[in-house]
Amino acid sequence: MRILLIGAGRIGSALAPLLAASVHTITIIDPDKIELSNCDSQGYAREDIGKPKAQILATQYGMTAIIARCQDGLPDADMIIDATDNFTARVFLNDLALERTIPLVHTAISDAAGVVFTVTRDGPCLRCVYPENPAGLACTQVNPDILRFVAARALSMVLTPEPVMIRVTEKDVRRISVPMMCKHRKQQELKEKQARIDATPTKNQPPFELIPCKTGLWRAKLQGKARLNTLKTTFPVVLDTPILVVINHPIAGEIVVHETELAFKYCKDQQIADQAAKDICACVFGNNR
Ligand SMILES: [Zn+2]
């Protein structure tokens, strides 16, 4: 499984060694460089100050690093782990996971609590759970037990994603019930449906091929100008202009009748095309001519 670990901060650096033991292919994404303050809290070495966090973790645990913000573009993956520290990135990842229909493991930690929540195919999304930017996600002093719990719980969600929210405090661990319906996923589906409609060919790109009639019957029967009046009363007329008539033949479908040729809009079957050409000639020129 290809997993994107977004964020090489407190949770990301705690989660990386756990993920390294798994068989998954991990790409770690973070734009930040190591600062002195990260050394104690996130386990980075002092001699690595100034180097990209993602690069250091990736080298240490056999992963791939992308030194950029997640909003700058993410490779294809089967799962996203949100170990970021800002709500904008979290919502971005949520929407991307919905769009790609892959699970998202959301993790967050504050001074007093940790949260792990998984967005799966069937459950609610992050926007359902946090309609607004939740306050108190910033942390200064994190209880190491809470951090360990969040990282371990995130790993178990990676192994078996389920649509639940687990909240841990110094007092207890709670499974929080979440609304089961997600209206955002519906919006995403509608957006995709509209995109598919928009992508279908329009007037500029005809949705059909025009196949000229191979029988030569029409050409052979032509005497000067075709008299199309009988044709128009015999077959349903789709289009009638001074230079062409499009009729709907019961078997061959739409046929473009021009003064000098017949062309089939959809029919590629030669036998059906031949029969339709005979029908039209019989109608316009009569059976005996
Ligand atoms: Zn939702």
Image (cartoon, grey):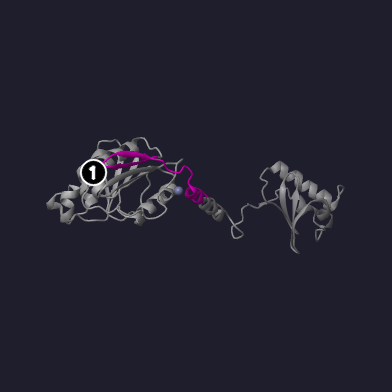
Q: Which residues are magenta?
A: 164-189
Q: Residue furthest left?
A: 47
Task: Decide whether residue 179 is among the magenta residues.
Answer: yes
Q: Going 28% across and 46% down the picture, which residue do you hit?
A: 113
- The image shows residue 59 at horizontal and vertical percentages of 21, 45
Q: Amino acid at mark 1?
A: Ala
| Front residue (pair 59, 221) | 59
**In this picture, is 152 found above or below 108?**
above
Q: Going 32% across and 44% down the picture, which residue do you hit?
A: 115
Instruction: Mark yes or no: residue 19 visible.
Output: no
- The image shows residue 65 at horizontal and vertical percentages of 26, 49
Q: Going 28% across and 36% down the picture, which residue do you hit?
A: 22
> Which residue is identified by label 1?
14
| Front residue (pair 233, 9) | 9
Instruction: Mark yes or no: residue 152 visible.
Output: yes
Q: Is residue 4 left or right of residue 97?
A: left
| Front residue (pair 115, 159) | 115
Q: Can you say which quadrant of the picture contains the N terminus?
A: top left
Q: Is residue 14 left or right of residue 188?
A: left
Task: Decide whether residue 160 is among the magenta residues.
Answer: no
